[in-house]
Amino acid sequence: METPEGTLSLPVPPLGYENHTWIAESDGMTSRAALAAGSGPYRSAVVPPISKLSVQLNGTMSADSEEAIAALASFDHYATSKLGAQSTTLGPMSAVLLRTESTSSSQIENLTVGARQLALAELDQSTSDNARVVVANVRAMEAALRLADQLDLDAILTMHAELMSGQRGWEEHAGHLRQQLVWVGRSAVSPRGASFVAPQPGLVAAALADLTDFMHRDDLPVLVQTAIAHAQFETIHPFVDGNGRTGRALVHALLRAKSVLTQTTAPVSAGLLRRTDSYFEALTAYRSGNAAPIVAEFAGAARFAARTGEDLVDSLADQLDAARQRMSSLRRQAAAWKVLPHLVTHPVINAHLVARLLDTSGTTAQRALAQLAETGVLSERSGFKRNRVWQHDGILRVLDDYASTLTRR
C-alpha cells in the first residue's frame, strides 16, 4: 500500500518495549559522572512474532520484488551456461563469488582485506588478522549453504560458530546464544541513550524459533520473505557479536533453500554495502512497523549483485582463457592443466594445496607449479626457498578491482 505522502508501506508488527533499570559498572575507563548518568531506567525491545505474518504487496512492490528475484535466477543460469554445467571451473567460480560476498559482508563491519591477503590466510600464511576473520566468514557462508535445507536453531548456531572461529578472544561465545544484554550505542557500560537495545537474553530462543517457522513458509514472495527474515534476525540480535555477518549468511541459506540460487552465490551484501546508511535506516523503519524500505534495499542489492556478478564471472573467465593460450605449448596430459581451474578459487597457491586438490604427490605438484610459472600463468612472489607460494596476478587484480567498486556512497 501507499502512505498519504506516496511512499510505499508494507505493515509489519512494530517493536514492543519493556522497562528495566540498569546499574552501570566501572570498566576502569569511564568516569564516575558517566557511570552515574549510565545508571537508571531504560527500555529494551520486545520482538513481535512473525511466523503467521500476513503479507500484502501492492503492484509496484510485487513487480519490483519479482524482477529482483528473476535477476538473481538469471545470473545463476548465466554462470552455469558460461562455464558449462559439468565444467570443473563452475565450482571454483561459485566459490570465488562466495569469497567476494564474504569480504563485502565483512566490510560493512569495517573489516577490509585485499584478495592476496585473503588467499594467503586460506593457506594459513597471512599476517592479517582481518584476513583470518574474513576467511571465517567464508566458512560461515559455506555452512549456510550446506545447511540450507534444515534452517533451524542448530543451523544458525553452526553458522555463528564457523564465523567466530576466526575472531580471537571470542571462542567462548562461538555458536552460543547470548546470555547478556547488547545494544547499539556509544557507551560500553550502559544501554541508556543507545539507538537500539536488543531484547533481553531470555526472549531470544523463542524469537528465533518463531523466525525459523517464518523462514519455512512457502506461501510468501521469496525476496520479501528473505528481507523480513533478515531484518527480524538483526532485531533479535541473538549473539554477543557477529549478528550482522551471521544474518547475511542466513540470506544466502534462504536463497538456496528457495531454489533461487542453486549453482552459485550472488554478492548480495555487495549491493547492501553500497548504501549502508539507507540499509540501517531500513532496519529502523522495519522496527517501527514498515518493511517496505528493507524490501526495497534487498531488491536493489539483488539487482546489483546479478549485474556485477555477471561482470565478475566474465572477467575471471577471461583470465582463464588467457592462461589457456599461454599454456598452449604444454601437452594436454601435463599436470598444470588440472591446476588451472582451481586458480580462480585459489589465486595464491602452494605445492601442499596443489597436492591435496589433485590428490597427487608433492613432486607432481611441484612440477605443475613449475609449468605454470614457466608459461607465465603464475609468478612466485614469496622469495622463499621453502614454503614457497605462487600467485595469479590477473585474478588477484580482478578481485581487487571488483572490491574497489564497492566503496560506500
Image (cartoon, rainbow, N blue to C red):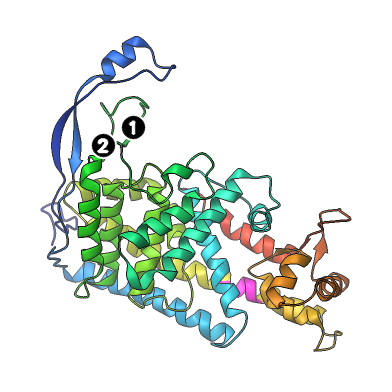
Q: Which mark is in front, 1 or 2?
A: 2
Query: Which secondary structure type mostly characterizes the magenta part of the structure?
Result: helix
Give the Cα distance between marks 1 and 2.
Answer: 8 Å
x then y, percent, for residue 29: 44, 17
Residue lying farthest front? 172
Q: Nearer the viewer, residue 36 or 320?
A: 36
Q: Earlier in the sequence, mark 1 or mark 2?
A: 1
In percent of the image, x 45 and y 66: which residue is there? 305
User: The residue tagged with tag 2: helix, strand or loop?
Assistant: strand
| In this rendering, position of residue 102 left or right of residue 45 | right
Task: Report which quarter residue 382 is drawn in.
Answer: bottom right
72 above or below 233?
below
Marks 1,2: beta carbons within 8 A: yes
Q: Which residues are magenta?
A: 313-317
**Residue 82 in the image, given as x and y percentages of width and height:** 56, 83
Percent of width and height locating residue 246? 40, 54
Where residue 409 is drawn, which disc sits there?
Answer: none
Secondary structure at numbered mark 1: loop
Q: Is residue 95 left or right of residue 149?
A: right
- How many numbered discs, if any? 2
Residue at the farthest top position: 32
Residue 43 shown left or right of residue 150 in the figure: left
Quadrant placement of the N terminus: bottom left
For the point 49% across and 74% down, the residue is 264
Tag 1: residue type?
A: Gly
* Residue ID for mark 2: 197
The residue type indicated by label 2 comes to Val
Q: Would residue 98 be visible to someone looking at this image?
A: yes
> Disc number at residue 185?
1
